[in-house]
Image: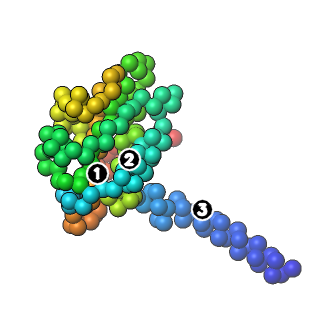
Amino acid sequence: MKTRSASLILVILVLTCGNALSQTAGNPVTDLLLSAWSPRNFTAEPVTDQQIDMILQCGIKAPSARNGQPWHFTVLKDEALMKEIISNIVPGNVIIIVSGKESATGTTPDFDCGLTTQNMFIAATSMGLGGRIYGGPIAAARSRREALQIPAGFTPVIMLRVGNMEKGPDAASGASPRKTKEEMVNYVR
Ligand SMILES: Cc1cc2nc3c(=O)[nH]c(=O)nc-3n(C[C@H](O)[C@H](O)[C@H](O)COP(=O)(O)O)c2cc1C
């Protein structure tokens, strides 16, 4: 009987501690979100089709308004075309261009495109790849929609560059600093 009670207490302790732990350090999702960063330097080691496939699956799983999924993904590997859009691209990089549905009035295609892009960024990072989101050169993608075979009714909104990172700064030194919570958060209790 005593052994049974002790086992029960042990199970409760493990469950309670496990739950507490999952809300702090040791939670792989929050640990990844807090350590993710956007590298600029990549090697020429190619990103594999399997890696791209998994990244796309994670993007497609993103939530969207009314589950409208108002997005289209262009996987760009053509080196010359990639260079026309992001000049310092290296072979082996892949650019995923996220285009939003033009006719989605009353919905939020740009916002939804941001969500799918962040899902893919985090997926790439979790796989040990480097990811960097690009909005600055979006005009270069928009003006090449024919070459990029963007389907009618969609406009490029944002891009994700994926590649193998050069071994260099770790997350602590590589990530850009953030404003403090005190600057940005207010609580209404
Ligand atoms: C919507 C958006 C647009 C961005 N556009 C560019 C860009 O045009 N060029 C660039 O080098 N980085 C771009 N970035 C990357 C940001 O500069 C980077 O996420 C930010 O500085 C934080 O860096 P960290 O993730 O390394 O901490 C963009 C990021 C976002 C979310």
Where residue 162 is drawn, which disc sits there? 1
Residue 181 position within the rendered picture, expressed as x and y whole percent measured from the top left: 35, 49
Assess whether mark 3 and mark 1 are in contact (beta carbons under 8 angstroms): no
Label whose residue precedes the other's in the sequence (1 or 3):
3
In x, y percent, where is residue 74? Answer: 32, 38
Q: Residue at x 37, y 44 (%)?
A: 118
Q: CA distance from mark 1 to mark 3?
A: 34 Å
- Label 2 vs label 1: CA separation? 9 Å
User: Where residue 120 is drawn, which disc sits there?
Assistant: 2
The amino acid type, in three-letter code, at marker 1 is: Val
Quadrant holding the N terminus = bottom right
Q: Secondary structure at mark 2?
A: helix
Amino acid residing under circle 2: Met
Question: Residue 37: image x %, image y %?
Answer: 29, 55
Distance from the alpha carbon under mark 3 to that under mark 2: 27 Å
Picture layout, residue 130 above or below residue 85: below
Instruction: Tell me if 168 is positioned left or right of 47 in this view.
Output: left
Q: Select label 3 or label 2 by which is in front.
A: 2
